[in-house]
Amino acid sequence: MTAIEHGVGRNDYGSVTDRIIAPALERRAPMGWWPIFAISAILALVFLTTIGLLLGIGVGILGMNIPVAWAFPIVNTIWWIGIAHAGTLIAAVLFLTRQSWRAPVTRFAEAMAMFAIVIAGIFPILHLGRPWFFYYLLPHPNSTGLWPQWKSPLVWDFFAIATYLIFTSLFLYLSLIPDLASLRDRAHGRPAQVFYGLLALGWRNSVRHWRRYQQCYFVLAAVAAPIVVSVTGIISLDLAVSIVPGYHFTIFPPYFVAGALFSGFATVILIAITVRWMFGMQAFITPTHIDRLAKLMLAFGLVVDYAYMAEIFTAWYSGADFYRYIYIDRWTGPYAPFWWAMIVCNVVLLQLVWFGRVRRSLPAMFSLALVADLGMWLERYQIVLTSTHADYVPANWDVVWPTAADWALQFGSIGLFVTLLLLFARLMPVLSIKDMREALHEGGR
Amino acid sequence: MAAPPPPYVMVAEFAAEDGLIAALRTLRDNGYRRLEAYGPVPSERLDEALGERGEAIPRVALACGLTGAALAYALQYFSSVLDYPFLVGGKPYHSWPPFLVVTFAVGLLSTVIGAFTAMLVANRLPRLHHPIFDVDAFAGASRDRWFLAVSGQGARFEGESLRLLLDRHGPVAIRELPR
């Protein structure tokens, strides 16, 4: 593998460190940072305001009803968790498989995972009738003597998301510690030195420390693989364990994980192209990286396409009227435009990624990544909504449409995500200095 | 708390890893044992030169993971079989297959927390200061420089002998520290 493929070019330890640290210590924001931050911060405020309204007024401001008791908050939970997954996969599984091209993309992939999981964790709490009682899911001593219902997928969900949240924050922080020490040693001015110094925990690059650090990193990376496949898998059980037609498919866990990674890789591509442009990282993030991420996106996208076919086949082969009707309803019912739009995004347009020229064109991949994220949102939408809106009792059938509050939470959550990423990128190294140095180290001293 | 770190008598700065490795080997061959090395990147060759072999962190992590998983299972068993048996959907009180989900999640979580905590405790971090930070130019260790610190007392650490050994491997600078 050449130095270009590593994304380190003609750099050495010193120049890699200086070039990655520069934007974090620079006082002036890079080009384009303020306009994007202004828009995303306004959306983030909309998100917080809507949460305030939701707590004050109640879940009635959202569109969900009976029979569609799970609507947009659940769509968003699954969507955001999926986005988080690729970040973990890139940082951990590509580390275990010694893919050294991953070095320039790991840091913001981990940060993306961190902020996506925070937002994913907010949504299921919001759609509870009384969100302030969400801690009932945690086994704790209480005056009623009650325990969580361990056979309920909702309790599993809580444990899966909480595990993933703690794992992601520790993994991100672990990878940041040596980089924070580099920032501490180079920061100008007392406040910055104290800030990075405290966060670096007194890291001093001792060889003995590095050895234990690597062991710890290895353990976390090894645990990441089962976490990636189990968290979305467990969330899919919320649906699959029920007997609702359209939810009750055995293919759900792998299907959800593939969909998660598909949308996650799309989001990594979006962030990679943005970081490359905004922070001038053209030397490190090359079209080769986008090409590899695009191949991974294509691979998981094709698994998702296979799952669509398997689901349709299962519905037909089951011979059960309600299962067959789910598909007739998805194709021709009130939500049919969403289903067909999903097919255009995730099946038709995805095929463009087969072409090398498309994969190496940054504008094309930026657009296709947006399309993939949209397609995966539509997929979660049609899974969650079309199934319960028409179940076994036709008298109960009803449709649900998003309200203004749903849209405010939808776009507000994207705004919060972008805001957090932009703040992170201004305070922390956007590329992992440690991983870049390791790529140099492996590539020959 | 941990004993205070031994005072360093001499710190050598190298521009490349190879110089540091050679110097480490020479010093170890000459009977110097209390050595500490610093560098910008983890390196297995350096671990070897320093004689580091332990694999403690993964073992601690495994033990934590298994303990956490066992406790999670025990809590589910205790709460749904012994403390508050409650019949749901005709399923047995001790429904081991659904119990495995939380057991698995908590097992992974305990592994992660165990590994991270073990790393910090074994490295004696966090700490606010360390004598090595007083060395001039030590900030280079977090950029592209490699450092070798020797500590100890006695005749072998006095005078020129140690300095000559270090000098053989082309250090950028050698600093004798006051003790």
Image (cartoon, rainbow, N blue to C red):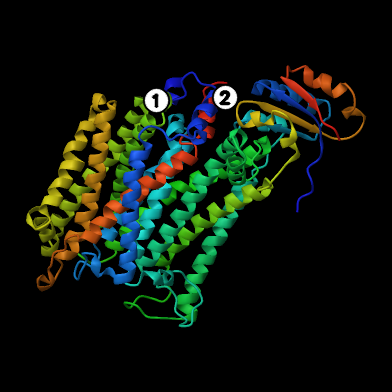
Residue kind at label 1, given as amino acid type: Gln
- Give me the residue at 24% from left, 61% from top: A405
Please tell me which residue lies in front, A11 or A312: A11
Q: Residue A14 carries which label?
A: 2
Q: How many marks?
A: 2
Residue sticking out furthest to the left: A332
Please tell me which residue lies in front, B72 or A106: A106
Q: Which mark is residue A282?
A: 1
The quarter of the image holding the N terminus of chain A is top left
Residue A386 in the image: state x and y as whole percent: 17, 59
Residue A262 in the image: state x and y as whole percent: 30, 42
Residue kind at label 2, given as amino acid type: Gly
Q: How far separated are the C-alphas under marks 1 and 2?
A: 18 Å
Residue B59 in the image: state x and y as whole percent: 61, 49
* Residue A247 shows in this picture: no
Examine the rendered structure and indicate whether residue A188 appears above or below residue A240: above
Quarter location, residue A330 = bottom left
